Image (tube, rainbow, N blue to C red):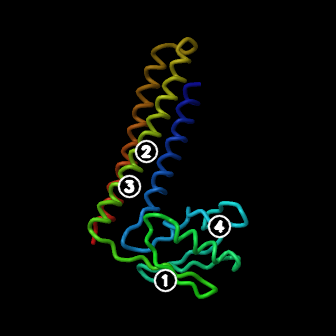
């Protein structure tokens, strides 16, 4: 029972860590990155659909991304969704077949703003991990009458270690992204 709680919590914390890394990837650096565009929602026949499901995304140059829709009729919707996305600032070119998204050079102020955004996303991820720890601790406390105080105390120490590992993973990913953003 204790192992089930700990393994379930570990899996959930790992998913939270992966989600944080994906969130960090969506924040723009000086280079065009297809990950930045993956989660943009396009109104495709009345349904919000992620851009990654509607088009292939390829780096053409360092700051240019080539977006090739699978369905050419969605070209205008894709272009509008990218244009309406805040914090992207992409200049779009449409030749009727593909969209070329060119990202302008980042200013120092813009870089610092992106660092703040990434730190906020990192803090949200840490809160998520801590909430998972609290939930697991409550589940362990409910098991005290069945398994005993010593086993629960040992499990709580292991839970703290698991939590620390995942929080450290978020911090490490945050440091990497921050360095990437501030690199000129």
If you read the primary sequence from the N terminus, does the residue marked by circle 3 or circle 2 appear first? 3
The residue to which callout 2 is attached is 124
| x and y percentages locating residue 89 in the rendered image | 43, 71
Q: Residue at x 48, y 19 (%)?
A: 151
Q: Position of residue 11 (x, y in %)?
A: 54, 41
Location of mark 1 (residue): 60
- Residue 101 falls left or right of residue 122: right
Disc 4 from disc 3: Cα separation: 25 Å
Viewer-proximal residue among 181 and 120 = 120
Q: Earlier in the sequence, mark 2 or mark 4?
A: 4
Mark 3 to mark 2: distance in Å?
Answer: 10 Å
C-alpha gap between disc 2 and disc 4: 26 Å
Q: Quadrant of residue 116?
A: bottom left
- Residue designated by label 3: 118
**Of callouts 4 and 3, which one flags the residue occurring earlier in the amino acid sequence?**
4
In the rendered view, would you say 145 is above or below 44?
above
Q: Quadrant of residue 38?
A: bottom right
Instruction: Give the position of the N terminus as an image quadrant.
Output: top right
Q: Which residue is mark 4?
A: 53
């Amino acid at each position: 029972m204790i192992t089930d709680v700990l393994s379930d919590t570990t899996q959930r914390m790992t998913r939270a860590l992966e989600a944080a890394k994906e969130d960090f990837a969506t924040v723009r650096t000086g280079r065009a990155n297809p990950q930045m565009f993956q989660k943009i929602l396009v109104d495709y026949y009345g349904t919000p659909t992620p851009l990654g499901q509607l088009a292939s995304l390829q780096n053409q140059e360092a700051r240019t991304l080539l977006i090739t829709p699978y369905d050419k009729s969605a070209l205008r919707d894709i272009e509008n969704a990218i244009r309406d996305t805040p914090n992207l600032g992409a200049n779009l070119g449409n030749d009727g077949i593909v969209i070329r998204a060119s990202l302008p050079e980042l200013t120092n102020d813009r870089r610092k703003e992106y660092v703040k955004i990434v730190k906020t996303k990192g803090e949200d991820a840490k809160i998520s991990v801590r909430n998972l720890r609290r939930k697991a601790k409550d589940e362990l406390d409910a098991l005290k009458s069945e398994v005993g105080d010593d086993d629960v105390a040992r499990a709580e120490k292991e839970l703290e270690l698991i939590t620390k590992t995942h929080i450290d993973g978020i911090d490490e990913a945050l440091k990497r992204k921050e360095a990437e953003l501030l690199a000129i």
